[in-house]
Amino acid sequence: MQQITANVDTSSVLERLGVGRDEELRQSNRRRRYLEKLSRVITPERPTVRLDPEHPTAHVNMEMDRPNIVITTREFDQPATGLSRDVYDMTVQEALLIHEVGHVLYTDHSAFQRTLSRVDLQYKGAYKRLWNSLEDGAIEEQLRQRFNVEDEIFVANANIMGDKARDDADTDALQSQEVDLYGAVTIGCLDLAVYDSGKFARLRDKSDNSLTMRSEVERELLEELVPILKDAVADVLTESDPVDRTEVIYDFWCEVRDRLDEADDEGQEQDEARETGDGDSGDEGGDGGQSLGDLFGDGDEGEPGEGGSSVMPIAKPDDTENADIGGGQPADRLDEEDLEEIKEELEAVADPEQESPDEKPGEEDGDTGAGSGESESDERKDDIEETRRGQLREEAREVNGADEMLGEIDQYTDVMEDLDQSGDYSGQVELAVPDDRDLDDLTRWNEAERRSRQVSQYLRQSLREERRSRRVKNQKSGRFDRSRMVNAQRGSTRVFEREEDGNEKDYDCMVVVDRSGSMGGERMELAEDAVTTLALSLEEVGVGVSVLGMLNNTGTLENAFGRDIENDRGMLLSNATGGATPLSKTLALGRERMEQKADSDNRFMIVVTDGQPDNGQQYREELNKCTFPVLGVYVDTAADDSDLFHRQVKVSSGDIEEAVTRLARQAMM
């Protein structure tokens, strides 16, 4: 919990709001909700998002009612961009999310499965890798064209796939790396279609010994494929129909397969490489070459930098196993200018003797001197940092109702300052904001929502009766009341009636929940269910609601006025208990806060407890200061005090919900 004092820095509260104890922001429920919200802005499919520390990258499951996107929470290295950790984590997770949403929007997995069925068994792994690489390029190109996601895609690709992952210590090790034909083709697909790491140009440059072909025969076969590869990538990146695009990829695969067969005919040992094209370990011979497993690393288990990842990326999601992914809807077609630009870039990437017309930050040739490339890189990094820093603040504000929580904290800091200055509670009054948490099992929340619909109808009926206009008799003016004719003849002036508007008062309710150790177990669970149901019901009928807890001898702000109850369901239904019952200090906090709501016509407080105040005399003094009703629900207690609340009821644990509902209804009538 974050302790709130009279001089708290609210910016520090904002940074931690929605993040649990010892939890990184990238692992938090706040981030999950933010990513889920972002996904629903991009696609009408309304995906759900789950964060998984064990997943290597990302995955989308379409076997449910709506897409379920899984995003890793692991920490990625950042060799290329130098952003602050929180900004970098957010950008990479956004990129992974956007990538998977791109598959939901633009990929037709059934078309891929149809082409996969035409591939011989020993080639299926290799075809999957090739299709995944080219399809990744296609969806990311469509995403860049339709949405403002260039920065996210660039940052993730530059760091995960870029050649800057090699540091100076790896230079000697890279001098002897050799690649077989299939590995070279896949490097080309990724560099041309997804991100230019520079590896494909190095591979084709005979003067660069850091990355070479395994044999001269394979080099010649690769050169035959280069123009076919460039045409295929251009067609894939510009084909908006996912079915036609998959056929283009399959046709290119057939060209690759024929060259692999030719390499076999020349005595190259391709069989084992093809059989391990899905990432299994391959040839362990001493010829200095690399199997596909060595090239890609173990993408499901390894970390960046392991298993030959300096040559091949291992962290792009594998979407070949995503059953029924995407609806296969055609994307927007690119105009001629875009097509020409893509083709020019492909020429530059594929040809080691040309320079890219639009070199991006993170793609320089390793020159760290003060030049225009570094200046542009720094400028873009600064822009990304500033933009994402603002988004981090908005993430907290939008997803967690932070403005309402911060506004409430501001109000309570004033309250605590006043109480300190009064001398009655000098340094004694404390308030904490609980760590964010969410529910793994939504059963209780769903049940509370269901019951709240019934309770809100009951409360709404009371409000309707309260606000209904009524006829008032025995008045000195108004419309003559014929039933008062006799009284008029006798000289009475109170023979009129008039219509009076109903009570249109606004209502505010503060619920105080005792979380002392004696409330533990089933009693706490039933109390939480009742309070959550009541809070949802009051929220539904337009009554302002706030929930204060008493946990570990401290007041806890479990829900702020104006903040959606759903944002705090994890705390409201946490079963957290501990400590004693600091009722007098909590009542002082609540009283002062309620008195601040001068614009509220009608205020009341409901306290759910099983114990006695920590200081009986001090508590009664606070109760006498209250200008609003304080209503108490005693739970399974033998307490016989009749003056601890303005109105109170004693109930068993199972009757708490009925009791708090009845008290709320009475307070609003």
Image (cartoon, helix red, strand yellow):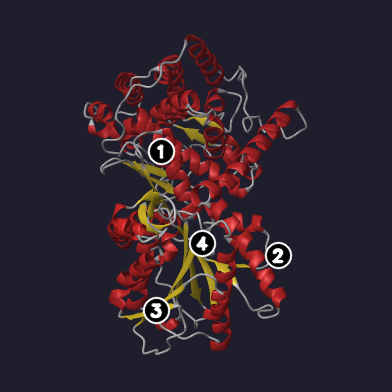
The nearer-to-camera label among 1 and 3 is: 3
On screen, residue 301 above or below 106: below
Identify the residue shown where x is 28% and y is 31%.
109
- Image quarter where the C terminus lies is bottom left
* Callout 1 secondary element: helix
Of pointers 1 and 3, the one earlier in the residue sequence: 1
Q: Quadrant of residue 553?
A: bottom right
The nearer-to-camera label among 1 and 2 is: 2
Where residue 266 is drawn, which disc sits there?
Answer: none
The x and y percentages for residue 80 are 62, 39
Drawn side of residue 291 relative to residue 67, left or right: right
Where residue 7 is drawn, which disc sits there?
Answer: 2
The nearer-to-camera label among 3 and 4 is: 3
Tell which of 609 and 431 is nearer to you: 609
The Cα atoms of the two marked residues, 1 and 3, are separated by 46 Å
Disc 3: which residue: 648
The Cα atoms of the two marked residues, 1 and 2, are separated by 39 Å
Q: Residues within 10 Å of mark 4 (few under 14, many from 20)?
A: many
The x and y percentages for residue 89 are 55, 47
Identify the residue shown where x is 54% and y is 21%.
349
Q: Residues within 10 Å of mark 3 (few under 14, many from 20)?
A: many
Drawn side of residue 536 relative to residue 587, left or right: left
* Residue 324 in view of the camera: yes
The x and y percentages for residue 545 are 46, 60
The answer to the question of whether label 3 and label 4 lie on touching residues, with beta carbons closer than 8 A, is no
**Amino acid tagged 2:** Asn
Tell which of 606 and 217 is nearer to you: 606
Disc 4: which residue: 20
* Callout 3 secondary element: strand
The Cα atoms of the two marked residues, 1 and 4, are separated by 25 Å
Q: Residues within 10 Å of mark 2 (few under 14, many from 20)?
A: few
Disc 1: which residue: 40
